[in-house]
Amino acid sequence: MKPSPFTYHRPGTIDEAVEMLGALGATGKVLAGGQSLVPLMSMRLAAPEHLVDINHVAGLDRVEVEERTVRVGATVRHRDVELHDGAHAAIPLIRQALVHVAHPTIRNRGTTVGSLVHADPAAEMPAVLVLLDGSVELRSSRGTRSVPAAEFFVGPMESSTTADELAVAATFARPPHGSGTAFHELARRHGDYAMCGVGAVVTTDGDNAVTAARAALISVGAGPVLVDLAGAVTGSGGGFQEAAVRDLLDAQIDPEDDIHASAEYRRHLAHVLTARVLDEAYAAAVVTRRGEEVA
Amino acid sequence: MTREALVPVAFRVNGSPRQLEVPARRLLSDALRHDLRLTGTHVGCEHGVCGACTVLVDGRPVRSCLVFAVSLEGSEITTVEGCCNAEGGMGPVQQAFQDCHGLQCGFCTPGFITTITAYIDENPDPSEVEAREAISGNLCRCTGYQNIVAAVQRAAELRASTSPTGGPGSTGGPGSTGGSGAIGGAGT
Amino acid sequence: MTTKMFGARIPRSEDPRLVTGNGRYLDDLGHDAYEAAFVRSPHAHARILDIDVSEALDVEGLVAIYTYEDLEADTASRVGEPLPLLIPHSTLTHGRTPYALARDEVNHVGEAIAMVVAENRYIAEDAASRIVVEYDFLPAVVGVEAARAAVDLVHDDVPGNVAAVMVQETGDADAAVDAAPHRLELDLAIERSASMPMEGKGVLAEWDPDDRSLLVHTSTQTSTSVRQAVAAKLGLPVDRVEVVTPDVGGGFGVKIVHPWPEEVLVPWAAVRLDHPVKWTEDRREHFVSSAHERGQLHKVRVGYDDEGRLLGLSVRFWHDNGAYTPYGLIVPIITSTQLLGPYKPGVYRVEFQSLYTNTVIVTPYRGAGRPQGCFVMERTMDAIADDLGLDRAVVRERNFIGPEEMPYDQGLVFQDGRALVYDSGDFPASLDKLKKLVGWEEFEAYREQARSEGRTVGIGLACYVEGTGVGPYEGGHVRVETDGTVVVSTGLTTQGQGHQTMLAQIVADELGVPFERIRVTTGDTRRFKYAVGTFASRTAVMSGSAVALTARKVRAKALSIAAEALEASEEDLEIVDGHVRVKGSPGESSSIDLGAVAVLSNPLRYAFDEASQRATQFASAADPNRPPVDAGDAPGLEGSDFYSPIRSTFANGMHAVVVETDPQTAEIKILRYCVVHDCGTIINPLIIEGQIHGGVAQGVGGALYERMEYHPNGQLLNASFMDFLMPYASEVPTVEIDHLETPSPLNPLGVKGAGEAGVIPGSAAIASAIEDAEGIAIRSMPISPSELFHLRKKNREGQTR
């Protein structure tokens, strides 16, 4: 299984890269981590005529932790984001999700921004971006635009990036104060695509009552499915009404049958895993609150 | 259909500088095996799942079947051949595999050896659970993994006992480049 | 003092080379060879109307393109004929084999249609992708049920898609079932899986036009048979063809089939092009053009008494053999016979139909039909226990053949064409060991404890026997060189089983030489020409025995020569550490090392080094009244011998598994996996344990993860490692092993085969444990969490019987 021939371009700056992509249009494809693209090319399911290798472009390899955001450059490997203590302290959900992305070896090369642009409905990081109201920064010869997460994932394997655009960074927003997060998924084997995965953000007030609760699910729709679960909150001790959670989920998810799991089983997993992450996220929120109070 | 263009690329393999001129689509696995005749790295699937092709790039395990050779300008690549000791004999990870009967047909073994070499660099004293987790991204059809788990711990043991400064594998091997798992900063 | 090697847990001599990246697997060879790629059918069943290669012809670096037309035109060879039907059987009335390149019709996705040869594989694939084939689509037959229904046919001239119908019986089993106090019927199913070694197939061929000789390297389990087949197909004299097995990255059965189309075509192309040609199979090719196994549907009728003793067992099953039958009926024959396990079945009848489908061919995969048979028998045993409210181990014990009843004739014909007679084994003792190892009697307490913690656990067990060491024969050759090195060869092949180490251990003891001085070659027709191959767990029995017998011959000759040289009598001599010496007097004057004996064994006219001077005509103290080489003798300290068994020798084993199922997610986790294993005398415990670990991993894979998913249109939906789920280390449990050794009375070493043991009862034991945990009948494997979820649902809704 060898790829078809292609012409290789190795820009050194963002401007060069963007110019190349502009000139190549639909015939060009960005090569970053390659962990999704290269096997597709080897199987000849993809055969771009031109590859623009951005691995040597300056200025794309930074993780920047700001007061309200964590910004990840296009060539930052999953593994570097995962191990970034500053990013983890600011947004624990990032590492909580990243440890589920394939295997460490794949994470050593694959990039988080690349994963977002690839927009696989079974991928973890699109769910994280959506859950945290993040955005992706796209640059082209026409200028720069920032696409919010809610608009970025257009369909299965389709993001709103156009052929001449380079995604230069993704920005994840910190959840509000008093929030806790968790991420769980179930796969057939270690490192496989999830049959179903759920990330959650639960926000609490000073009395540890839940003021907001959202979940993003993977492998149960055309992209990450964001569900507002505030309506299922019951009592003021972090409880969620099981039937209400199920109804809210079922209204939005649309799992399919495949060889690994039935749609019905996936739906069941969505219910089970969401309950688990909500509990965990709430517990984390309580701990965070306590920590913030002490500080 | 005209012959495709050759692209120059220069990187270091097992401590030696190498220059290649290969088609852009030449996978690193094929470049190592056929252009550089380093056949220790094996190809089991070409879709990144089995791990037999795993080499170290700047000290970190990477699937060589999922990287184009030309993309690695300036990189430091270590293959299983580079995990030998200074005299070309078995390094600690390789010795551990023999001690523990961690290989049968040997085809998947190079991918495990590079992966474990990098792993014990970062985790010099893994528990059995950690050892098993560390190797759970590489497929083996022969051994059932039990002896490979033992080999991880044995390798850590051998590594620790051979030298306080990092063992025989440190001459030009992965641990010395400092590239593995850069924490707290951006990737280089 | 020499340490005894036989039974020693020594590390392997193969390892230093392999772990340092110095293995020589097929694709490591022939860097300057042309490389081949194939156009393979994307359709499961179609007639080929036209093959248009015009777009491919201008690919730079293309060397040649071949289709069936080219094969047919080569009348000097037989490459245009169908590939051989390797193991004929009288009941295989409708056997079919493919052409090396499809002639008019393709019968499975992956069947080869055209071969492209180019400067390298990248270019070969470019050219292949430009070849346009026009098809007339035919309906595809997929799955046993569709094959049986026979609404469509795979082969026009095979009615009902039935390749064979075979019956073996020891009496009127159905009558015995009807007459029994209790009776059960079960429907059982096992899905397709595959050997899936980490290295696919590969062939490298080099033709010497001056010498008119062909050298073929192939990743095979039988170099001697490939040699015969290639010579026959290419129309070459056998002695002009040599086949060498390189290092092989796993076989597990799939590489015993031969000749693969590529094993014929690559040498054929090398001859035509007068240039080395190589083909390295890629993973997708392996999925769709190698072989699968395991898919069967069974219907069991069993009759038993109040104690759970079998009175009658009537089994009918349908075996999916894929599109062709090159390996005959070996797999279902093994299922039919090994299904009986360690039990007395009462009256037994087994009938199977081997059916064609438009899918990849089915040939042996480790276990070779035994896992299916074991699954059927062991689920039946559990069902009987459940029906009578008896302990599952007790029901088995009551049906065991006792050790005092050995040898036990089951009254059937086995896969080697010989009587199915168990020569040895102590099943009650094995079960006892297993129960102790897993804590069978204490499990209920453990279950209660788990229940109080909200956890669901279950325990299962399964027993099997395995006929190993099938014939017809294997041979060995041993030669002591003048420097004291011992060179050993045998004709069968190695795929990671440590044969070089194991056989050297045998020779070290038999000949009295240090292990380090021994070099073993396997699978090279240049070094040993008569062999059968590596399969059916036969190497230790067959080549082990042959090499032992050979070493004994060489030892006798060494003693005879040394006796003359030392002026002692043979009975007073022993060989220790490579020195022949007088017993009880370890001084130098009364010993001679084997290298020197080797020198003396070959009387010379010309010396070529200092050592050989001793053997020249004026230097040696030869008896002038005898010829230098006696009539009937031969020069050299070497010998050959063969071992040919009267029948297979029966290993056995029992596995017990503890599982935990998640009440919510239906995930299945193996908490403990225990094995009691009897392979007769053990040569290297380290290697045996490794074989068991590996087999268990494949058993776990087959029980919980691996299944070939065919769409009804014949597309293989999971033709990659992403979706064909082989277990990683995270999915495989730690295996606890205990041994029993009941030596085989059938061979000089007392050994039995061990290669397949680990995999045989996997599905059976795991199904037993899941059923025990869930209280739901598990009759089909593999099982996934999604499937368990649905079974639970059905059970709650009262639909499961």
Image: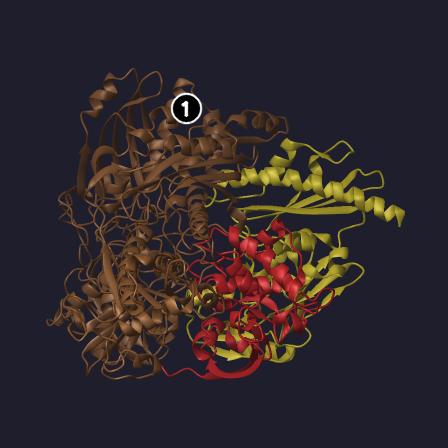
Left or right of residue C488, residue A250 in this image: right
Is residue C608 in view from this perspective? yes
Which is more toward the observer, A11 or C752? Answer: C752
Q: Is residue A247 above or below residue C606?
A: above
Q: Position of residue C142 (x, y in %)?
A: 29, 46
Binning the other alpha carbons within 10 Å of mark 1 as few (below 14), some (14 to 19) or many (20 upward) gives few
Q: The chain shown in yellow is which?
A: A
Label 1 secondary element: helix
Picture mark count: 1
Q: The chain shown in brown is which?
A: C
Chain assignment, label 1: C
Q: Position of residue C270 (x, y in %)?
A: 24, 76
Which quadrant of the structure image shows residue B135? bottom right
At 19% across and 29% down in the image, what residue appears? Answer: C170
Quadrant where the image shows the C terminus of chain C: top left
Which is more toward the observer, C729 or C514? Answer: C514
Colour pattern of the rendering: by chain
Q: Residue furthest left?
A: C75
Q: Position of residue C703 (x, y in %)?
A: 43, 41
Q: The chain shown in red is which?
A: B
Left or right of residue C145, residue C498 in this image: right
Which is more toward the observer, C20 or C13? Answer: C13
Q: Position of residue B159 (x, y in %)?
A: 63, 64
Left or right of residue C191, residue A144 in this image: right
The amino acid marked with disc number 1 is Val
Which quadrant of the structure image shows residue A126? bottom right
Is residue C460 in view from this perspective? no
At 28% across and 50% down in the image, what residue appears? Answer: C362
- Name the residue carrying label 1: C394
Which quadrant of the structure image shows residue C571? bottom left
